[in-house]
Image (cartoon, helix red, strand yellow):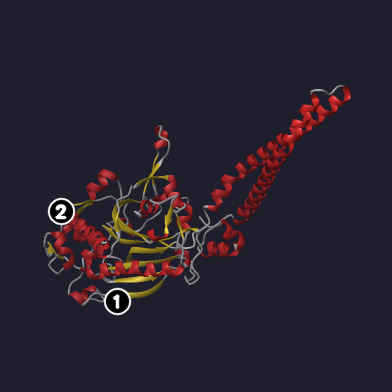
């Protein structure tokens, strides 16, 4: 949620930010409702103050009149009774007027709140403008020794590469048919060495973040209340992507949702809390199962392990002071952690600066990391894929957007209570990361070489097949 005071002071920033992201927001209606709301709040406050003042003033007056009534007769008594009735009516009149204003406020509050929740975080000033992913800007690439993603795989390795679909079939690493039989499309069963490799990469990434980089190991729920999804910015815009558990229909007090990332649980930990300054930065990492409906997604990605409904992910979250320089510094560090892992896995990759149209609702800045996958891309003359980069990680800066929605605050050095800044980044998502691992490290004999750093997690094995 945005800071409504900031919107009042500079509505153009938020209007331009939504336009840059290609998002429609009912700003005119929001402005009108906000003005109504402020007017009603002011009226209620003024009338309550008047009510309190009158209550203090008329008490002695009423006591005096009641005393005079004891001995009053005729016209004097009628006059005193009229004066008493008038005094008694004044606070009642104000009470009724306040009740009317409160009803009017309650009528507009839900719509005001609903529109406010749709206002996206404006992009940072240095994010490139663009309509969508096609306008993202390549920042840099990295290639392992002896391989260049800009050149054909076969020319470098001496054989035509198999796709990950062919490799998992030949090496019996996954069973798609039985996965679909049990759960429907985009489900799978990891088998044998496929499951072992899946567990190895997750364990390596989790140990890397906790043991080498000091992040706190944290297990969080993957089934959460709606408030947690709204608080982290995944609702209302992403509601169609979440799996819904309709507990209220079975008599429970609230519905639940399956999370699409460990970020939801990690950020929800400190909702409605005020943290001491020395608690920051919070550095959390978790490994969790993630669920995404992938509603509307179609195309070649629906086959295999790239775009699936259930996967496991090691996630990193940082909550820091409300300082742009700190946030940018952490963003670089978090991306650096991922680059170290990919370089140790010997996977070619590139960094993309996402443009405004590809940021999403909650991000002020986002950098995607894409690994080179020989089995992706358009088909060549031989009918085989020519290779392409595919997204494996996203690193986001959110400023105070999530923390404001979650009411996650801290007390700064001057004792002022402020909303913190938040960042998140995929450390590793599997089985998607298995695609470049299998395809890049495949050998001419059909086996797959296991990178050195993963061998201890694979029982010392140096290859599959």
Q: Residue at x 22, y 66 (%)?
A: 439
Whether residue 50 is visible? yes
Q: Residue at x 77, y 31 (%)?
A: 64
Q: Residue 94: horizontal and vertical position, in percent?
A: 71, 38
Left or right: residue 188 versus residue 267 is left
Q: Crowdedness of circle 2 by 10 Å Cα count: few (<14), some, many (20+)? A: few
Quarter containing the C terminus: bottom left
Q: Residue 310: horizontal and vertical position, in percent?
A: 30, 51
Say what secondary structure mark 1 lies in: loop
Using the rendered view, name the quadrant where residue 134 is placed: bottom left
Using the rendered view, name the quadrant where residue 370 is placed: bottom left
Frontmost residue, 185 versus 226? 226
Q: Crowdedness of circle 1 by 10 Å Cα count: few (<14), some, many (20+)? A: few
Vertical order, 179 against 441 (above or below): above
Frontmost residue, 423 versus 279? 279
Question: What residue did someone put label 2 on?
Answer: 192
Left or right: residue 452 versus residue 335 is left
Using the rendered view, name the quadrant where residue 334 is placed: bottom left
Whether residue 379 is visible? no
Task: Tell me if label 2 and label 1 are in contact, CB under 8 Å.
Answer: no
2 or 1: mark nearer the eye: 2
Q: Residue at x 52, y 52 (%)?
A: 117
The circle on residue 437 is none
Frontmost residue, 376 versus 426? 426
Question: What residue did someone put label 1 on?
Answer: 150
Say what secondary structure mark 2 lies in: loop
């Amino acid at each position: 949620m945005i800071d409504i005071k900031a919107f009042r002071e500079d509505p153009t920033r938020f209007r331009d930010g939504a336009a840059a992201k290609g998002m429609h927001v009912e700003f005119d209606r929001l402005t009108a409702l906000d003005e109504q709301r402020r007017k009603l709040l002011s009226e209620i406050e003024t009338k309550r103050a008047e009510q309190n003042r009158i209550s203090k003033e008329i008490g002695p007056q009423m006591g005096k009149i009641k005393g005079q009534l004891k001995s009053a007769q005729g016209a004097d008594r009628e006059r005193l009774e009229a004066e008493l009735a008038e005094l008694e009516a004044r606070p009642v009149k104000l009470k009724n007027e306040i009740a009317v204003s409160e009803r009017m406020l309650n009528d507009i509050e839900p719509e005001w709140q609903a529109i406010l929740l749709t206002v996206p975080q404006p992009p940072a000033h240095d994010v490139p403008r663009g309509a969508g992913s096609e306008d993202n800007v390549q920042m840099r690439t990295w290639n392992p020794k002896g391989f260049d993603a800009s050149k054909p795989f076969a020319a470098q390795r001496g054989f035509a590469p198999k796709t990950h679909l062919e490799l998992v079939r030949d090496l019996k690493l996954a069973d798609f048919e039985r996965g679909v039989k049990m759960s429907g499309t985009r489900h799978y069963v990891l088998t044998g060495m496929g499951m072992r490799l899946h567990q190895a990469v997750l364990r390596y990434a989790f140990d890397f973040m906790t043991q080498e980089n000091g992040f706190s190991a944290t297990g969080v729920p993957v089934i959460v209340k709606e408030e947690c999804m709204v608080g982290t910015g995944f609702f209302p815009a992403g509601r169609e992507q979440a799996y819904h558990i309709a507990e209220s229909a079975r008599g429970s007090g609230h519905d639940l949702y399956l999370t699409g990332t460990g970020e939801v649980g990690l950020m929800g930990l400190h909702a409605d809390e005020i943290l001491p300054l020395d608690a920051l930065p919070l550095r959390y990492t978790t490994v969790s199962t993630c669920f995404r409906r992938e509603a509307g997604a179609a195309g070649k990605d629906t086959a295999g392990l790239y775009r699936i409904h259930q996967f496991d992910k090691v996630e990193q979250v940082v909550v820091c002071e409300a300082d742009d320089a700190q946030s940018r510094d952490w963003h670089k560090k978090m991306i650096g952690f991922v680059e170290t892992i990919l370089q140790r896995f010997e996977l070619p990759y590139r960094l993309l600066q996402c443009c405004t149209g590809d940021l999403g609702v909650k991000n002020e800045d986002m950098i995607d990391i894409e690994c080179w996958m020989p089995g992706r891309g358009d088909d060549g003359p031989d009918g085989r894929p020519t290779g392409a980069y595919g997204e494996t990680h996203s690193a986001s800066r959110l400023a105070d957007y999530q923390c404001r929605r979650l009411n996650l605050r801290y007390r700064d050095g001057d004792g002022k209570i402020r909303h913190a800044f938040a960042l998140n980044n995929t450390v590793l998502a599997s089985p998607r990361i298995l695609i470049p691992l299998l395809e890049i490290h495949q050998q001419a004999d059909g086996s797959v070489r296991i990178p050195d750093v993963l061998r201890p997690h694979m029982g010392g094995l140096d290859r599959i097949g």
